């Protein structure tokens, strides 16, 4: 099976790098990192992601704005998972790992949990 | 009509806040006054505090995601920054202070006046965390 393409948008390069490392070593994912949210649309056009993982709070442009921009263009139905360091894993679990139906995952991210979450939003688990 | 006790308590609180402003300057003093009021009635046990911070973060995240950042959101961000300081989470303090500063710069009116407060925290977040914790523990002990 061809690797699923995951676009990771976060201003923290250490985080995106860690995600790339952990996802790609499974052989099931190809990851493109974006550390400047203003470059998200251009990167998406080039990479054609099947799912996007993005931080909520970033300098210049927050995750909501980035996703809105992507969805306003040719990525209307692109599944997204938000990453946040502002809530604990426990706090999110108590809310079924979502806020208003939007999937969330807390930092620090556990690779197994992240993979499970990605597979869920891609519709296979 | 205030009761005598309530009035005395209020006067003490005001004197305390004025003292904080004099001692630490207007920007930090104003912020420390909010540290004093942050969940004033609760004993700040760490797990309970973390749970409170999770709950407080939800509407703020929701507002950011839907691009509906309003006055209540800014109060929420400041409250989260203070709560994280009391919890001793310096990285979270920096995150919220940065977010708060970016947001208040886009607002007019009284929020513009708070710019020096966020800047003061970002200048020395460690000091803010330390003093916020000391202040809170002192207030809980008296």
Image (cartoon, helix red, strand yellow):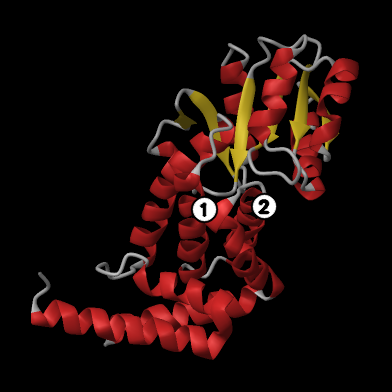
Decide: is A12 above or below B5.
Answer: above
Query: Helix or strand or loop: what does disc 2 sit on?
Result: loop
Q: Is residue A92 left or right of residue B96?
A: left
Residue A123 in percent (x, y) is at 58, 11
Displayed quadrant of residue B41: bottom left
Residue A37 in percent (x, y) is at 79, 35
The residue labelled by disc 1 is B77
Seen at 43% across and 54% down, the residue is B53
Chain letter of the residue carrying label 1:
B
Query: Disc 2 and disc 1: Cα gap in Å?
Result: 14 Å
Residue A90 in percent (x, y) is at 43, 45
Displayed quadrant of residue A69: top right
A9 or A38: nearer the viewer: A38
Report if residue B138 is visible in the image. Answer: no
Decide: is B132 above or below A57.
Answer: below
Q: Is there CB contact under 8 Å for labels 2 and 1?
A: no
The residue labelled by disc 2 is B105
Seen at 86% across and 31% down, the residue is A39
Query: Helix or strand or loop: what does disc 1 sit on?
Result: helix
B11 or A116: nearer the viewer: B11
Report if residue B131 is visible in the image. Answer: yes
- Mark 1 is surrounded, within 10 Å at the Cα level, by few (under 14), some (14 to 19) or many (20 or more) other residues, namely many
Chain letter of the residue carrying label 2:
B
Q: Nearer the viewer, mark 2 or mark 1?
A: 2
Kindly identify which numbered label has been placed on residue B110: none
Seen at 50% across and 35% down, the residue is B62
Decide: is B58 above or below A44.
Answer: below
Badges 2 and 1, same chain: yes
Seen at 62% across and 38% down, the residue is A83
């Amino acid at each position: 099976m061809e690797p699923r393409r995951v676009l990771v948008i976060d201003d923290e390069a250490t985080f995106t790098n860690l995600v790339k490392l952990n996802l790609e070593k499974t052989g099931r994912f190809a990851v493109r990192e974006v550390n400047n949210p203003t470059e998200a649309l251009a990167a998406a056009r080039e990479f054609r992601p099947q799912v996007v993982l993005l931080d909520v709070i970033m300098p210049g442009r927050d995750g909501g704005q980035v996703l809105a921009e992507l969805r306003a263009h040719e990525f209307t139905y692109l599944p997204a998972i938000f990453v946040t360091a502002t809530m604990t894993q426990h706090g999110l679990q108590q809310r079924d790992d979502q806020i208003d139906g939007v999937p969330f995952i807390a930092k620090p991210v556990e690779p197994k949990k992240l993979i499970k979450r990605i597979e869920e939003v891609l519709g296979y688990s | 009509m205030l009761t005598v006790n309530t009035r005395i308590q209020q006067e003490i609180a005001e004197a305390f806040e004025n003292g904080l402003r004099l001692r630490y300057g207007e920007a930090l003093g104003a912020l420390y006054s909010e540290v004093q009021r942050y969940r004033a009635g609760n004993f700040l046990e760490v797990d309970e505090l973390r749970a409170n911070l999770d709950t407080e973060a939800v509407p703020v995240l929701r507002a950011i995601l839907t691009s509906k950042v309003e006055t209540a959101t800014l109060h929420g961000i400041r409250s989260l920054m203070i709560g994280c300081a009391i919890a001793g989470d310096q990285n979270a303090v920096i995150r919220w202070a940065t977010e708060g500063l970016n947001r208040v710069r886009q607002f007019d009116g009284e929020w513009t006046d708070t710019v020096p407060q966020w800047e003061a925290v970002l200048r020395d977040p460690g000091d803010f965390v330390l003093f916020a914790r000391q202040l809170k523990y002192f207030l809980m002990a008296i």
